[in-house]
């Protein structure tokens, strides 16, 4: 419990921002779902046969896996809050529509006959007694949708929309149970609070319910308000993980110490695809990218060289020509792919080099899906080193857990991971230089440097700085010792005389 409280205290600033994002995404989705489902329910009660088909179709929507739906929406509407809200609305419509339709259908027909006899119009019947009688059913549907939305909204973090899911993803990435619990418990408490509020509204008068929803909508819209400012500002995003978070905090400290530009940070913004898409969509202005990633992911016909300088120059030239992006000078450390084993396993099997694994055909390897299918991954290991391992594909964040629990023998890791130091693992030497250099450098649009020319010289202060051992140490301090990433970044910059 003490560790959980300590982790929460160290993450307070990020927590409140994530909580607000989660509430915004959830409530916007809920309001839109209500505005869609309730009018449809009112219309469908006049067409029972059509209603049956409509309920079936909206029910089918709920069977679509969340990740699949988000994946389908990204090419259409990009990343961020929009696809997350669309997906949540799709899931929320069915319970609201079904319960609203059921509540309206259960109204005694004799009441309608009496109302018609008194000369009441449809609108008068609806506002006088129909909505009041159906309201317990309608509110029950809204409660169900609310709980489902708040729980499912944690997946919004996968597409750069923020929310409490950031803590869950970061916890999985760092194998930190406390971070996972912060995200999960907070989401559960939020769902309980909103469910309780809606339960209290079930027996309230329609006017009270409408006023409550209207006030909630005003508060929600007000939370988006930001007073206009003439101050210069940019947004820097970072991929999911400790290292990118440290790097973007370095960028922020350097820029704000040497200019009048205000920097907003978006840490744990997703994987390479999401950060790259966000940069092109102007949702962020800069993010740290790795030289090897640019060549293997974005560039057609990349260089085959493994020389760091050659690779960076090729990445800088080609990304400018093919994608019209500016890539500044890289830092010194290389966060490249590596294969790691437990030290006891290395000693028993006399392992020092990747080629030594060739004699261990029964060795169980843990790779992520991307590494397993890349030419500079397992395909290259098979071709260059002649390996034929028993491969288990899994999420990157689970690989270390699998290795330490002896579920696998060989793990795909990154050379500056803090877990290498934490678990005292042995990294096998890549003597044939399969893995290309992966050095981090700022990636941005040329228009940003035209607007703020000083950025180039400021950020290039980090060129050639930070050794492998220094990066491992900083990653360890944040991931294991739970130090604040901003503090760790600032301490390094001060130690190098880059800021005062």
Image (cartoon, rainbow, N blue to C red):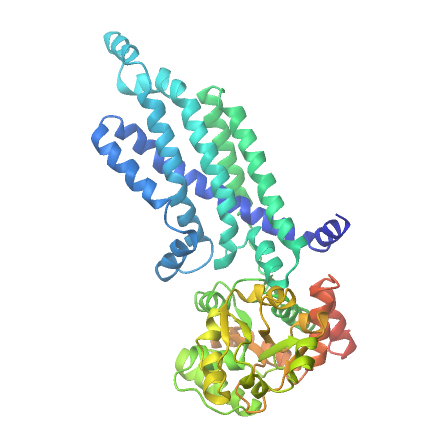
357 left or right, relative to 298: right
Q: Looking at the image, which residue is at 59% across and 79% down?
A: 339
In the image, what residue occupies the spot 44% across and 67% down? 277
User: Looking at this view, is 361 or 301 the one in front?
Assistant: 361
- Nearest to the observer: residue 58 or residue 444: 58
Q: Is residue 341 visible?
A: yes
Name which residue lies at 44% across and 69% down: 280
In this orientation, which residue lies closer to the viewer: 444 or 185? 185
Residue 328: x and y in percent read: 56, 81
Above or below residue 362? Residue 278 is above
**Which image quadrant is residue 400 in?**
bottom right
Look at the image and tell me in which quarter the C terminus lies: bottom right
Frontmost residue, 226 versus 280: 280
Compared with residue 20, is residue 275 higher up or lower down, i.e. above or below?
below
Please state if 202 lies on the left or on the right of 268 as rendered.
left
Residue 152 x/y as whole percent: 48, 47
Kindly identify the residue that appears in the image at 51 percent across and 44 percent down: 151
Image coordinates of residue 231 in percent, x first then y, are 60, 62
């Amino acid at each position: 419990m003490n560790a959980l409280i300590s982790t929460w205290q160290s993450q307070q600033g990020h927590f409140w921002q994530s909580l607000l994002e989660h509430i915004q995404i959830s409530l916007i989705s809920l309001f839109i779902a209500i505005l869609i489902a309730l009018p449809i329910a009112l219309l469908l009660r006049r067409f029972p046969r059509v209603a049956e088909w409509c309920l079936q179709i909206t029910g089918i929507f709920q069977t679509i896996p969340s990740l699949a739906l988000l994946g389908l929406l990204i090419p259409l509407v990009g990343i961020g809050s929009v696809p997350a809200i669309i997906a949540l609305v799709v899931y929320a419509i069915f319970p609201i529509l079904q319960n609203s339709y059921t509540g309206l259908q259960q109204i005694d027909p004799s009441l309608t006959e009496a109302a018609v006899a008194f000369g009441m119009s449809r609108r008068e019947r609806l506002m006088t007694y129909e909505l009041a009688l159906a309201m317990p059913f309608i509110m029950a549907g809204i409660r169900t949708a609310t709980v489902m939305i708040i729980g499912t909204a944690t997946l919004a973090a996968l597409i750069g929309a923020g929310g409490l899911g950031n803590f869950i993803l970061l916890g999985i990435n760092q194998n930190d149970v406390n971070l996972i619990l912060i995200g999960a418990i907070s989401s559960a408490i939020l769902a309980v609070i909103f469910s309780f509020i809606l339960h209290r509204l079930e027996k309230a008068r329609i006017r009270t319910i409408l006023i409550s929803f209207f006030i909630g909508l005003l508060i929600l819209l007000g939370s988006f308000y930001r007073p206009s400012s003439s101050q210069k500002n940019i947004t820097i995003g970072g991929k999911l993980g400790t290292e990118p978070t440290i790097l973007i905090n370095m960028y922020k400290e350097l820029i704000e110490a040497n200019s009048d530009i205000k920097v907003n940070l978006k840490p744990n913004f997703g994987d390479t695809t999401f950060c790259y898409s966000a940069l092109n969509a102007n949702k962020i202005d800069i993010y740290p990218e790795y030289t090897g990633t640019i060549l293997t992911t974005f560039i057609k016909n990349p260089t085959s060289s493994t020389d760091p300088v050659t690779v960076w120059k090729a990445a800088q030239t080609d990304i400018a020509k093919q994608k019209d992006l500016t890539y500044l000078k890289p830092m010194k450390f290389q966060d490249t792919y590596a294969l790691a084993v437990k030290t006891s396993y290395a000693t028993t099997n006399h392992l020092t080099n990747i080629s030594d694994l060739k004699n261990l055909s029964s060795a169980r390897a843990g790779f992520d899906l991307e590494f397993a299918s890349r030419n500079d991954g397992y395909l290259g290991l098979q071709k260059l080193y002649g390996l034929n391992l028993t491969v288990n594909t899994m999420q990157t964040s689970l690989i270390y857990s699998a290795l330490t629990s002896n579920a696998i023998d060989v793990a795909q890791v990154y050379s500056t991971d803090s877990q290498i130091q934490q678990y005292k693992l042995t990294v096998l030497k890549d003597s044939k230089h399969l893995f290309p250099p992966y050095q981090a450098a700022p990636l941005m649009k040329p228009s940003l440097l035209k607007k703020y020319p000083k950025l180039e010289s400021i950020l290039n202060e980090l060129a050639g700085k930070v050794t492998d051992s220094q990066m491992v140490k900083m990653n360890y301090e944040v991931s294991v010792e739970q130090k604040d990433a901003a503090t760790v970044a600032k301490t390094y910059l001060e130690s190098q005389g880059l800021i005062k």
